């Protein structure tokens, strides 16, 4: 292959400039090569694209509703609130749930003589080539339709500009924030701080939602429109509302709002470009690790962290100790633990406190609404938390990657392996679930429901462990070996989503007896739930380890091959 | 035992990846107590062969025995006799060196007291004791090789299978590794390792096999394979290298 490398005597030989076009072509090429000869990946991609289009169509009609009905009263409300949620979603969802598609890993460009501006623009434009961006584009064109039907073609045209700027803002926000957090999680000094910060930020979403919905319940629609107008003047809502402003005669607002958007976009890109730089050099050297001395005890004593001192100094104990250390030391696993903590607070509050009845409420506030919750609803919400916690293990071998070879070489029996992994994970998760149960019971002012909540949580968590250990053996996939804990392989995002969905569905089915019991047994269940739930969860987990362990024994080498990243 | 089994016996091992044949039927007998070098250029199938021999990769065809125990039918016994250091495979590198050794020892079902004692000795001999609480992920390449070797040696295996033990290792560490391997072989152990560094193989090995294109091209004691020439000459001839004519890459000279 002839490479256009030249070390001519004339150093002024024209160097062809690199533009964003090259990054886009590179991304498409990498995506294409990932699909080559992998039929299931193409199928997954197409499935994901269709799913995205379906959501896009739903969003389109929501945003277009004021235009289609010809009623402009709530147009600003829909645009500002919907668009604002969209930006927030782009900001938080990658962080908490999905990760970002790092087809083009910035670290790979570290050695190329590229100006930072070129690099950031290129990576940014390449990031725009994705199904979610297309889906959002389709959905938000509903706003264009609204603006056009309310204010003619000039308003529509302004709306197009606004929507495009808004999408750029979404992508820039998600990149900047994940990149910044990845940098922080990588750095040894502020890693713990970053974890806490992330947890707090995400956990704030829960209460915010409660207050938001409470406000929605009390406030009349005109006041909400006022709030929406204010949101429309922040970067969250500015790009989405410009078209409607023009349509409703506030032409002067359009340039100001577009300026707000552009300034926000510029700030985000500047922030991103700073953290990209640290990601690039960080890949080469994460700084000199402090040589920690003061080693006490023998090698075995060092392996076992304090929470596992009870474990025997044998195969099972070693696995538990190593897993327990990994859940703490591996940034990717730690990010998952944070997700559980966040979801654990967020989902039950959402369902129990705000789910009831905001049509009939006379505005007596929290407790009145809360008392409408029933043991069945509580058990259902606990079911979701337990299942979501356990689903983290759906790709537990993927976290290990090729390091799993050590266990294959040592010939670890599958049942011991799975039981140990469940135990180590539970060391972190069970206390969290306990906190969730207590907090929820008090939030509902029903302390007598603690047994019910804990029982429901443990039962579904145990059932989830059982289902997920089987899925982790059969449906494992490799994770990219980058230092960004939020990075996903392209195409793996949907695989992950589908697998997670499957695991959750099956887990829910397995845990349904708890809901049925809550519905049928009445008050007696309040006391029975804890012992029965604990026994059910433990039994399910052990049975799961027993069955899945057998499968694991037969396919250890195959599992190792699937979790080893392709190089 | 009435019959002396070879330390490692491979019969017709074959593996195909996505239509390309990586290993096309390898037969090999490694005598007990030998120091066996598996030579081959990049992409010859060395790693694939060794992975199939130790139970990390399921072969499409063929079988492997360790001291008479079938690796794929009776993996528990075979794996107990084996010590393995794979190449291109991560260690559980978010542990410290001592923690990693303890993990591997207990995973092999060893007594904790023995693990403690051997781990301390290995860390000392391999000059890894100074690393203290540094995680293995922060080790240098040479240190990673050494801790990998320590993990393979810890349970006192009868057969040691090492994939590229001298790759990316500085001369001091290489000398240390060589020394330890020689002592291990002198004590009755069998060493099988892959490499493409001729001089190391020539200095250490009693037996050699040259692998290219997924098949064994030459096999025997080192003197049989060399046949009076240098190992490098034989290797290049067997593998069929290409020599530069000086015409191409002219732009390299300024």
Image (cartoon, rainbow, N blue to C red):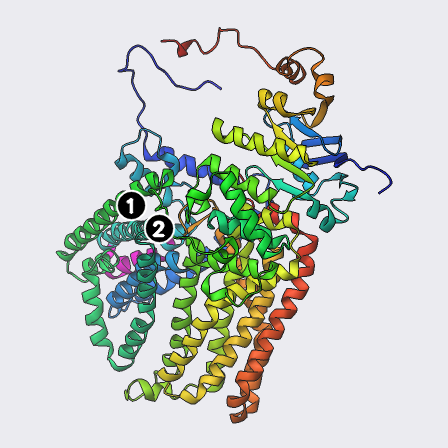
Query: Which mark sits nearer the N-terminus, 1 or 2?
Result: 2
Give the left or right position of residue A225, taking residue B163 as reference: left
Q: Residue at x 43, y 79 (%)?
A: A437
Give the left or right position of residue A68, taking residue A317 as reference: left
Nearest to the observer: residue B47 or residue A17: B47
Label 1: state its secondary structure.
Answer: helix
Q: Identify the magenta region.
A: A138-152
The relative height of residue A296 versus residue A405 in the rendered view (above or below) is below
Disc 2: which chain?
A: A
Pointers 1 and 2 in contact (CB under 8 A)? yes
Find residue A544 and report its horizontal and vertical position in percent: 63, 67
Is residue A517 a member of the stretch shown in magenta?
no
Is residue A149 a member of the stretch shown in magenta?
yes
On residue A182, which mark appears?
Answer: 2
The single residue placed furthest to the bottom in the displayed view is A523
Find residue B171 and report its horizontal and vertical position in percent: 48, 26
- Residue that mark 1 sits on: A275
Report how far apart the C-alphas of labels 1 and 2 lie in the structure: 9 Å
Nearest to the observer: residue A166 or residue A317: A317
Prevalent SS, magenta region = helix
Disc 1: which chain?
A: A
Find residue A400 and report its horizontal and vertical position in percent: 53, 51
Q: Residue at x 32, y 57 (%)?
A: A194
Residue A360 appearing in the image: no
């Amino acid at each position: 292959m002839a490479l256009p490398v030249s070390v001519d005597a004339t150093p002024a030989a024209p160097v062809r400039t690199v533009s964003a076009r090259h990054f886009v072509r590179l991304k498409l090429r990498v995506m294409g090569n990932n699909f080559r000869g992998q039929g299931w990946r193409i199928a997954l991609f197409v499935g994901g694209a269709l799913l995205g289009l379906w959501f896009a169509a739903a969003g389109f009609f929501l945003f277009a509703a004021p235009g289609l009905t010809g009623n402009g009263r709530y147009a600003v409300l829909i645009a500002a609130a919907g668009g604002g949620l969209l930006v927030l979603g782009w900001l938080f969802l990658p962080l908490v749930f999905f990760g970002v598609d790092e087809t083009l890993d910035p670290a790979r460009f570290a050695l190329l003589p590229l100006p930072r501006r070129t690099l950031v623009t290129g990576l940014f434009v390449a990031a725009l080539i994705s199904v979610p961006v297309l889906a959002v584009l389709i959905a938000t064109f509903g706003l264009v339709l609204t603006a056009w039907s309310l204010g003619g073609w000039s308003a529509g045209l302004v709306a197009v500009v606004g929507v495009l700027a808004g999408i750029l803002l979404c992508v820039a926000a998600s990149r900047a924030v994940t990149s910044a957090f990845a940098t922080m999680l990588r750095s040894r000094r502020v890693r713990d701080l970053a974890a806490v910060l992330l947890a707090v930020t995400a956990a704030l979403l829960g209460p915010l939602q409660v207050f938001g919905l409470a406000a929605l319940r009390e406030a009349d629609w005109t006041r909400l429109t006022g709030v929406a107008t204010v949101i429309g003047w922040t970067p969250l809502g500015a790009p989405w509302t410009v078209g409607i402003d023009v349509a409703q005669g506030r032409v002067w607002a359009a340039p100001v709002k577009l300026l707000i958007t552009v300034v926000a976009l510029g700030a985000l890109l500047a922030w991103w470009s700073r953290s990209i730089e640290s990601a690039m050099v960080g890949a080469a050297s994460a700084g000199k690790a402090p040589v920690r001395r003061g080693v006490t005890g023998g090698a075995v004593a060092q392996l076992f962290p304090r929470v596992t001192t009870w474990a025997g100094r044998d195969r099972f104990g070693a696995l538990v100790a190593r897993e327990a250390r990994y859940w703490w030391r591996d940034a990717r696993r730690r990010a998952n633990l944070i997700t559980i903590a966040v979801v654990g607070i967020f989902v039950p509050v959402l369902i129990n406190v705000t789910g009831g009845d905001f049509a009939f409420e006379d505005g007596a506030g929290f407790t009145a609404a809360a008392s409408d919750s029933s043991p069945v609803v509580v058990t259902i919400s606990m079911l979701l938390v337990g299942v979501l916690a356990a689903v983290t293990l759906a790709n537990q071998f993927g976290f290990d990657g090729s390091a799993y070879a050590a266990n294959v070489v040592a010939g670890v029996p599958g049942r011991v392996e799975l039981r140990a992994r469940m135990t180590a994970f539970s060391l972190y998760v069970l206390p969290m679930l306990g906190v969730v149960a207590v907090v929820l019971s008090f939030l509902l002012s029903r302390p007598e429901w603690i047994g019910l909540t804990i029982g429901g949580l443990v039962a579904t968590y145990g059932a989830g462990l059982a289902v997920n250990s089987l899925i982790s053996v059969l449906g494992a996939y490799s994770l990219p070996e980058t230092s960004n804990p939020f990075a996903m392989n392209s195409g793996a995002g949907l695989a992950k989503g589908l697998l997670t969905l499957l695991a959750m569905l099956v887990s829910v089915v397995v845990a349904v007896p708890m809901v049925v019991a809550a519905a049928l047994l009445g008050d007696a269940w309040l006391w029975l739930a804890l012992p029965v739930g604990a026994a059910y969860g433990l039994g399910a987990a052990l049975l799961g380890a027993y069955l899945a362990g057998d499968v694991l024994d037969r396919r250890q080498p195959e599992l190792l091959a699937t979790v080893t990243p392709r190089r | 035992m009435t019959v002396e089994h070879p330390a490692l016996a491979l019969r017709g091992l074959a593996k195909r990846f996505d239509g390309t044949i990586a290993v096309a039927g390898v037969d090999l007998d490694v005598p007990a107590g030998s120091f066996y070098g598996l030579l081959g250029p990049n992409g010859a199938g060395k790693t694939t062969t060794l992975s199939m021999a130790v139970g990390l990769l399921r072969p499409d065809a063929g079988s492997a025995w360790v001291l008479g125990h079938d690796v794929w039918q009776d993996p528990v016994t075979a794996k107990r006799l084996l010590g393995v250091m794979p190449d291109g495979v991560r260690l559980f590198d978010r542990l410290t060196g001592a923690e990693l050794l303890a993990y591997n020892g207990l995973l092999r079902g060893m007594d904790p007291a023995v693990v403690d004692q051997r781990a301390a000795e290995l860390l000392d001999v391999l000059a890894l004791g100074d690393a203290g609480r540094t995680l293995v992920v922060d080790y240098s390449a040479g240190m990673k090789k050494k801790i990998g070797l320590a993990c393979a040696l810890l349970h006192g295996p009868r057969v040691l299978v090492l994939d590229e033990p001298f790759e990316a290792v500085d001369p001091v560490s290489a000398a240390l590794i060589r020394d330890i391997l020689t002592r291990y072989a002198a004590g009755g152990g069998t060493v099988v390792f892959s490499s493409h560094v001729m001089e190391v193989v020539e200095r250490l090995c009693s037996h050699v096999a040259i692998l290219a294109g997924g098949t064994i091209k030459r096999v025997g004691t080192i003197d049989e394979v060399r046949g009076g020439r240098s190992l490098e000459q034989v290797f290049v001839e067997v593998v069929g290298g290409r020599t530069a004519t000086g015409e191409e890459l002219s732009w390299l000279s300024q």
